[in-house]
Image (cartoon, rainbow, N blue to C red):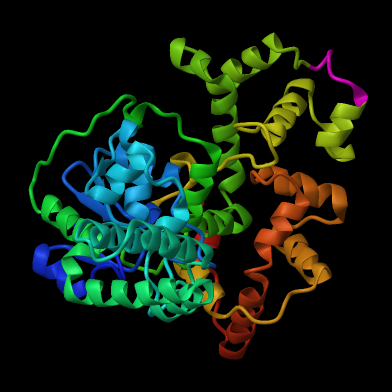
């Protein structure tokens, strides 16, 4: 049972641990952070603050992905309140007044809780302080409206007390006096000003209880379809091997390495593609993989006698067209052209059937870590192409393209871009091997 808390500066790490002693504090949440978590129904994620520009914000699909695992997700104060107001129908739990104001429509702009730099103040906190100052008859309604207009006119990165005072003075002498009065009021009554902080502390208190108020779910998160965007994000952000490498070694890059260099990857891709084509037909009848795939393809008009000469020439090399039989040619075409969904990417995540053994996967992650650490000058296209010709033992545009497609790449350009990261590493390893007289092949290259 782990509670992950993403916050700062609304509450500090010390305040998080004081309220939830066993929590795991994280910096403000940004796109990809939640995809690195391995949570289940016993865990809790608390979202309070989001990272500012230029970091992209956490996406709705990422939160829904966490919810679909049965993980409790609580949102409050900043980006947490905003996302909870948008995702409560799917099970996200909102806490606090900021969340309530978003749900009720009293707040409708991200700018209300946008993160600023040091010394900045959130618009929703100013709004709350101004409202309480009016209720305590410290400010008039007219002065309150003027100050709120000034605050709204400031960019969230420039929304500081000095900027607010300067803007108010430019408006009128009375507004400048009201700004000074508001500042004294908030200093004397922090409990009537720091609304985001109060909501954040309430969310932390809620997280310490094993169960909280049941969320009003209208559509369970697990029922929502997984999108290609989410699968790509997961592959790009999830560490390849937990606790072995940082997030700079994502699953996607490790799979790309195996696509390029694992001797058995074409066989893995062939099984994966044919199973994808066969679909329910393979699972619903007692027939082999090849037979089921050919049967489905034939029903969709993909058969040797129905395909044009141009189609054969696009997917197969001249040698394959001359030497292979009709069924073998068709299977090659099916495997090379297979896509899980419309678009150029043949797959979007890291399918289990393409990963290989645990040992090869871990060794591949080590190679990717070394390649990332050694990244230097850009590699010329000609050098990348020569590298692939040597590794795949083929020459010419047609053979290289065919080899790339046999490994699940959409084409040669995609394979070359993936290989660019590793070319320098292979050159260094080969030089070291020559200097020491030792072989330098990874298990990925040795094993199938």
The quadrant holding residue 122 is bottom left
Position of 229 compared to 88: left or right? Answer: right
Front residue of 243/19: it is 19
Seen as rendered, the residue at the extreme right is: 309
Percent of width and height locating residue 321: 86, 32
The residue sitting at 50% across, 69% down in the picture is 367
Residue 137, x across and y down, in percent: 22, 61
Regarding residue 166, the answer to whether it shows in the image is: yes
Quick check: is 308 in the magenta stretch? yes
**Residue at 53% across, 64% down:** 153
Q: Is residue 172 above or below residue 265?
A: below
Please say whether residue 272 is one of the residues in the magenta stretch.
no
Camera sees residue 21: no
| Near-viewer residue (259 or 205) | 205
What's the residue at 13%, 69% (across, down)? 17
Question: Is 343 or 220 nearer to us in this picture?
Answer: 220
Q: Is residue 242 left or right of residue 410?
A: left
Range covered by the magenta-colored residues = 304-309
Q: Residue at x 22, y 47 (%)?
A: 95
Magenta stretch prevailing secondary structure: loop
From the top left corner, tell me how far across and down residue 365 is, in percent.
Answer: 46, 64
């Amino acid at each position: 049972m782990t509670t992950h808390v993403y916050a700062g500066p609304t509450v500090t790490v010390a305040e998080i641990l004081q309220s939830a002693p066993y929590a795991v504090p994280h910096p403000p949440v940004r796109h990809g952070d939640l995809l690195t978590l391995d949570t289940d129904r016993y865990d809790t994620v608390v979202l309070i603050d989001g990272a500012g520009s230029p970091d992209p914000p956490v996406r709705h699909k990422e939160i829904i992905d966490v919810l679909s695992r049965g993980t409790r997700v609580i949102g409050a104060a900043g980006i947490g309140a905003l996302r909870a107001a948008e995702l409560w129908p799917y099970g996200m739990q909102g806490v606090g007044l900021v969340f309530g104001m978003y749900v009720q429509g009293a707040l409708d702009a991200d700018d209300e809780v946008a993160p600023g730099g040091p010394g900045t103040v959130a618009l929703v906190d100013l709004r709350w302080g101004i409202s309480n100052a009016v209720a305590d008859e410290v400010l008039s309604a007219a002065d309150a409206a003027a100050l709120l207009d000034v605050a709204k006119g400031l960019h969230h990165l420039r929304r500081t007390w000095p900027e607010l005072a300067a803007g108010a003075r430019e408006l009128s002498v009375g507004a400048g006096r009201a700004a000074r009065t508001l500042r004294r009021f908030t200093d004397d009554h922090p409990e009537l000003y720091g609304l985001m902080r109060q909501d954040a502390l309430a969310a932390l208190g809620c997280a310490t209880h094993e169960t909280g108020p049941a969320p009003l779910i209208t559509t369970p998160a697990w029922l929502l379809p997984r999108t290609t965007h989410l699968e790509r994000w997961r592959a790009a952000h999830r560490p390849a091997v937990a606790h072995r490498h940082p997030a700079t070694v994502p699953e996607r890059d490790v799979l790309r390495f195996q696509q390029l260099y694992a001797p058995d990857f074409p066989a893995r891709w062939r099984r994966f593609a044919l199973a994808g084509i066969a679909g329910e037909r393979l699972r619903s009848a007692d027939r082999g993989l090849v037979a089921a795939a050919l049967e489905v393809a034939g029903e969709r008009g993909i058969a040797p006698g129905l395909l044009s000469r141009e189609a054969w020439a696009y997917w197969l090399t001249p040698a394959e067209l001359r030497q292979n039989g009709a069924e073998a040619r068709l299977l090659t075409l099916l495997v090379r052209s297979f896509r899980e969904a419309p678009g150029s990417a043949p797959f979007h995540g890291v399918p289990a059937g393409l990963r290989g053994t645990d040992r090869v996967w871990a060794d591949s992650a080590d190679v990717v870590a070394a390649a990332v650490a050694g990244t230097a000058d850009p590699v010329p296209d000609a050098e990348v192409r020569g590298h692939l010709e040597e590794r795949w033992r083929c020459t010419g545009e047609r053979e290289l393209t065919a080899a790339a497609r046999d490994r699940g790449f959409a084409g040669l350009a995609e394979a070359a871009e993936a290989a660019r990261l590793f070319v320098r590493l292979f050159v260094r390893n080969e030089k070291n091997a020559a200097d020491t007289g030792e072989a330098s092949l990874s298990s990925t290259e040795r094993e199938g």
